[in-house]
Image: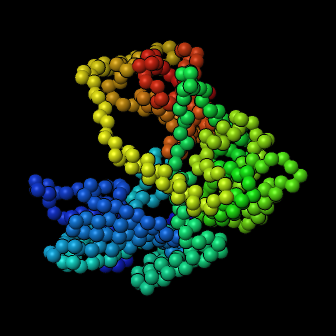
Amino acid sequence: MREKLCFCEFHVTSASALLDWLNADKNGDAKPLVSLTQHPAVDPDASYESSFHADRVCFNTEWERLASKITVWVSPEDDIEFRQIELHNRTQVPMELELVSAFEVTLAEFSADAAHLDPACVLAVRIRIAPLGRATLTFASAAATNEETLHAVLDKHLQYSHIQRASLMSATLAGIRLRALDISAEQFAALQFMNTALLWSLVRPQRQELSGRGSVLPLPVCDRRLLWRFGISGERPILLVSVGIVQGTGLLRSLAKALRLWAWSGLACDMIVLNFEPDSYIMNLQREIATIRERLAGDAVTSTTPTALHLLRAQELTKEEISTLHTLARVHINADGRPLTHHLQEWIASHEAALLERDNNDPVRVASASRRRAITATTGAFDPRTGGFAFRVSEAVRPMRPWSNVLANPDFGCVLTDQVGAHCLAQHKRAHEASAPAGSGGVDHGGASGRAQHLLDEHAAHFRHARPQHKLAMYPARARRWLWR
């Protein structure tokens, strides 16, 4: 029997997402809402900044007339999230504001939620701040399996003392957790950058390079199936560590602490240690790494979460397998005896230098065509024999309006569009050849490293890729009824 979840958002004290200046612009029109964070409604006149702590995140935004700070944390006792907003009026006159807090109830994964709109909860508060004055407000979102529990949580946290207690307990328990993991404040700050690299970096396809003689070098091999014999799927973020000396075990111990932290936080990750130690009777490095792996395997947290350490010997891998590891790895560290913080600072400095170079370069204007090619609306007709509808498409022949079709049965289906893009759905996803979900950060290298999506053209008797990676000008065709295989 499925449990019913009850949600409620309420305003606790004297917003969180959007702000209305309650005045008009120079033309007399109402100004649009802007967000107190950089997303979703950025204000070009504002300066945004965020800082992450062990148990909470803070968003600071500054205007010439107003400064705001949002602090978000979760109560360790109840299923309730708090968003405390501090506003500072920097002017010598009173300021009237309307703060809007909105959230969307999501009971599915992000990819499934992005395909539709769930019910949303919106609250608005209108306040007046005195000259050079400050105002503090708190919004909270609570969830419970029944209405009685939900009302009890609401009544409890309508008292501001319980909000302060939840904030203090959250910080205290986070500190206890970090001390239990033996992670210092400096290491925790460095690991936050590692979290960004594992969660948000993309595995990009390698570009072909020219040799000294001008010939095109072959692309590096990237085939996830080559990693399956090691128990590595290649679908989770990969942290690759190359080590060849015993002095590199200090960095491995620091990363082992990170694995425990990520396992406790629910961040799936495959840490792959590539050992380059020469074969010998002693092999001290191999024994040290094996000891670290055994301790993680016996840990109560890491042993029950999708976070694992894999130990591979470089001498036992083929060139294709090593190439696949280097291509799929989101972070690659060479354990040369230096501490983890030094490697991460070097990695951060390289990204900062790249950002500075991009900012200093003049923007390149993309030349637009002087004359736009005329596009003819295509027309189609039904086939009296099969009942299917067909029409011709190319770069110059397009449908009058964008369209999409749903082809589905109770177990499997897809959505096709006029741009030849598609999304699939299935009860047992691995039983079908389907494209990787949008926004997963994966890269399909010829279908070997990801799930490929194909359509069978009954008329032409061959397969086509159902991905908009090629222009239609290269494939003028007659769009017909498609079948999934």
Residue sitting nearer the eye, 394 or 92: 92
Tell me where residue 306 sits by quadrant.
bottom right
Residue 336 in view of the camera: yes
At 63% from the left edge and 54% from the top edge, which residue is drawn? 269
Residue sitting nearer the eye, 333 or 81: 333
Quadrant occupied by the C terminus: top right
**Above or below, 372 relative to 340:** above
Question: What colour-coding does the image apply?
Answer: rainbow
Q: Is 377 on the left or on the right of 173, as rendered?
A: left
Tell me where residue 338 sits by quadrant.
bottom right
Residue 186: x percent and y percent? Answer: 55, 69
**Above or below, 174 relative to 333:** below
Q: Is 12 on the left or on the right of 193, as rendered?
A: left
Residue at the extreme right: 281
At 52% from the left edge and 76% from the top edge, which residue is drawn? 170
Residue 432 in view of the camera: no
Residue 126: x percent and y percent? Answer: 24, 71
At 39% from the left edge and 49% from the top edge, which residue is drawn? 356
Quadrant occupied by the N terminus: bottom right
Residue 245: x percent and y percent? Answer: 74, 54
Residue at the extreme bottom: 161
